[in-house]
Image: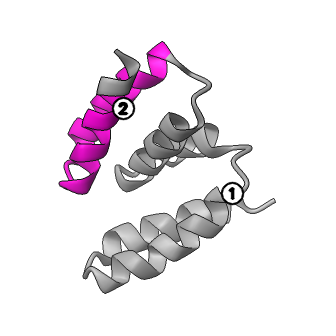
Amino acid sequence: QRTAWHRLGLIAVQAREFEIAQVELEKAHQIDPEHRGIRKSLGYVYAWNGEFDRAYRMLEGIGEAMDEMGVYAWWWREQARPDLADQAENLAQLLKP
């Protein structure tokens, strides 16, 4: 059930359980590889897990992803997570046209 895996993945993201989120979102992506929301969520989780090549492939062609990574860089710093802020900045650089 694509929707169930997607929502479970989003719940795990909110709980900052990124490894669990990755497994659940990958299951949703296997069912529907063209679903934009799943691709974005999974791409962001790949970024938080430091898997930049996979994140780039998932987010390639999603125009707003680069700008959103810039916002996430700021937001993660506000959350006292400089590690994730750095990962967001790195991915934003990779996504630049």
The reply to whether callout 2 and callout 1 are in contact (CB within 8 Å) is no
Left or right of residue 9, residue 91 in this image: right
Q: What residue type is labelled 2?
A: His
Q: Which of 92 and 4 is in front in this view?
A: 4
Which residue is under mark 2?
6
Q: Give the range drawn in magenta.
A: 5-31
Q: Which amino acid does label 1 sit on?
A: Leu
Which residue is under mark 1?
95
Asked if 24 appears above or below 50 in the picture, the reply is: above
**Residue that appears at 69% across and 44% down:** 60
**Residue that appears at 46% across and 16% down:** 30
Say how the picture is coloured: one colour
Left or right of residue 18, residue 48 in this image: right
Query: Where in the figure is residue 80, as x and y percent of width and height?
Result: 25, 82
Quarter of the image that includes the C terminus: bottom right
2 or 1: tag closer to the N-terminus: 2
Query: Where in the figure is residue 47, as x and y percent of width and height?
Result: 44, 52
Query: Where in the figure is residue 89, as x and y percent of width and height?
Result: 53, 71
Asked if 64 appears above or below 58 in the picture, the reply is: below
**Residue that appears at 54% across and 37% down:** 39
**Residue that appears at 74% across and 62% down:** 96
Could you classify mark 1 by the number of other residues whose Cα lies within 10 Å: few (under 14), some (14-19), or many (20 or more)?
many
